[in-house]
């Protein structure tokens, strides 16, 4: 009896394998079109992962990767033994949490507002206008902010504060203002990109829902509350999960360029990425920098898995996988 069962199982496996190969051959053109993307993914994302071993070596430039001695977890110990470890980790986490919440709310709100514009020409203009800051480099953004906050000739000190009878503020010497400046600047730069994604998602909502709601006497806000936002929830969940996966990564340009290298602002501007860059620049320790990058990647991967698991427990249809 067991022999018969094994024969049947093997026969089914052979038939299934043949069916799989037939399906591949039938869609060979589509697989061929996928090939450039797969090759790019391997070259750009997976082959460089070989460099992870540097995080576990006492890297020596003259000996190279293979010649350098194994260092175990010493690079990780050094990373977390510094006095700034708590500050940079705290700043990275809290800033990114605020960025995720603020950018999500503003992006959805902006997408809903732009979607209500009836003129196609005006809608395209607004979409382009809100998307433009996303393509500006951090250097340009830093000098735009500096033109506003310059202590002597900046717009804020020279015109805005004087109009309200407030004295000049030395912005680049006052750390207490910069958490708000970072949040506002990040939102100004990235909300437009997020709103475009949500506008694209709203384009897939069946207009019959709005027509039925209008017939039933629903006002515009009620339509947004009970139709638009619930329909956007899957996209919002996916975007949030992806953002949480990068919660240990920070916008290096934002935190490095914006403060203009002001030492006074280090306690509020020091995040993991800027700390690693400054350490690499001053000490040239590639092993420690690689350890920090490996640490960020592992934590981000675990956060994506755990967040997706939590979403799947609460609402399986909105989970990423």
Image (spheres, helix red, strand yellow):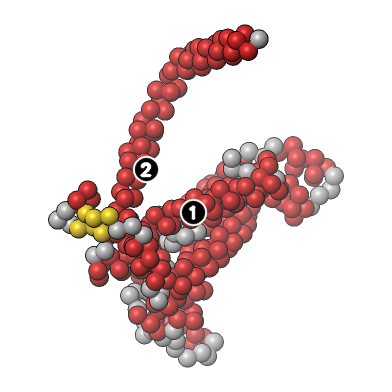
Instruction: Name the image quarter holding the C terminus.
Output: top right
Task: Tell me where residue 277 sits by quadrant.
Answer: bottom left
Could you tell me residue 15's position as x and y percent? 55, 11
Could you tell me residue 160's position as x and y percent? 49, 81
* 308 to the left or right of 287: right
How far apart are the alpha carbons under marks 2 and 1?
16 Å
Residue occupied by mark 1:
300
* 127 to the left or right of 39: right
Q: How many marks?
A: 2
In terms of depth relative to the viewer, which is nearer, 87 or 4?
A: 4
Residue occupied by mark 2:
45
Could you tell me residue 271's position as x and y percent? 42, 68
Identify the residue at image location x=36%, y=59%: 73
Q: Residues within 10 Å of mark 2 (few under 14, many from 20)?
A: few
Instruction: Name the image quarter holding the N terminus.
Output: top right
Q: Residue furthest left?
A: 62
Task: Tell me where residue 152 sits by quadrant.
Answer: bottom left
């Amino acid at each position: 009896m067991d022999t018969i069962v094994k024969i049947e199982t093997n026969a089914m496996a052979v038939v299934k394998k043949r069916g799989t190969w037939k399906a591949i051959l039938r869609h060979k053109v589509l697989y061929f079109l996928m090939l450039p993307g797969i090759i790019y993914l391997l070259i750009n994302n997976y082959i460089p992962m070989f460099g992870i071993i540097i995080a576990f070596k006492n890297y020596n430039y003259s000996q190279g990767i293979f010649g350098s001695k194994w260092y175990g977890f010493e690079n990780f110990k050094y990373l977390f033994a510094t006095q700034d470890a708590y500050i940079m980790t705290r700043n990275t986490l809290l800033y990114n949490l605020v960025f995720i919440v603020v950018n999500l709310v503003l992006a959805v709100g902006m997408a809903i507002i732009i979607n209500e514009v009836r003129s196609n020409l005006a809608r395209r203009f607004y979409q382009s206008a809100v998307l433009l800051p996303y393509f500006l480099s951090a250097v340009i953004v830093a000098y735009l902010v500096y033109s506003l906050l310059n202590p002597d000739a900046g717009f804020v000190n020279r015109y805005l504060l004087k109009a309200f009878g407030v004295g000049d503020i030395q912005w680049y010497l006052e750390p207490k203002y910069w958490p708000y400046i970072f949040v506002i600047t990040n939102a100004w730069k990235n909300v437009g990109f997020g709103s475009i994604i949500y506008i694209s998602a709203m384009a897939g909502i069946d207009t019959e829902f709005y027509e039925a709601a209008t017939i039933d006497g629903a006002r515009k806000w009620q339509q947004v509350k009970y139709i638009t936002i619930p329909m956007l929830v899957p996209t919002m969940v996916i975007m949030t999960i992806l953002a949480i996966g990068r919660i240990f990564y920070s916008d290096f340009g934002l935190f490095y360029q914006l403060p203009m290298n002001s030492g006074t602002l280090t306690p509020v501007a020091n995040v993991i990425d800027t700390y690693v860059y400054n350490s690499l620049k001053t000490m040239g320790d590639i092993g420690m920098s690689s350890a920090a990058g490996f640490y960020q990647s592992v934590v981000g991967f675990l956060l994506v898995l755990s967040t997706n698991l939590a979403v799947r427990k609460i609402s399986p249809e909105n989970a990423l996988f």
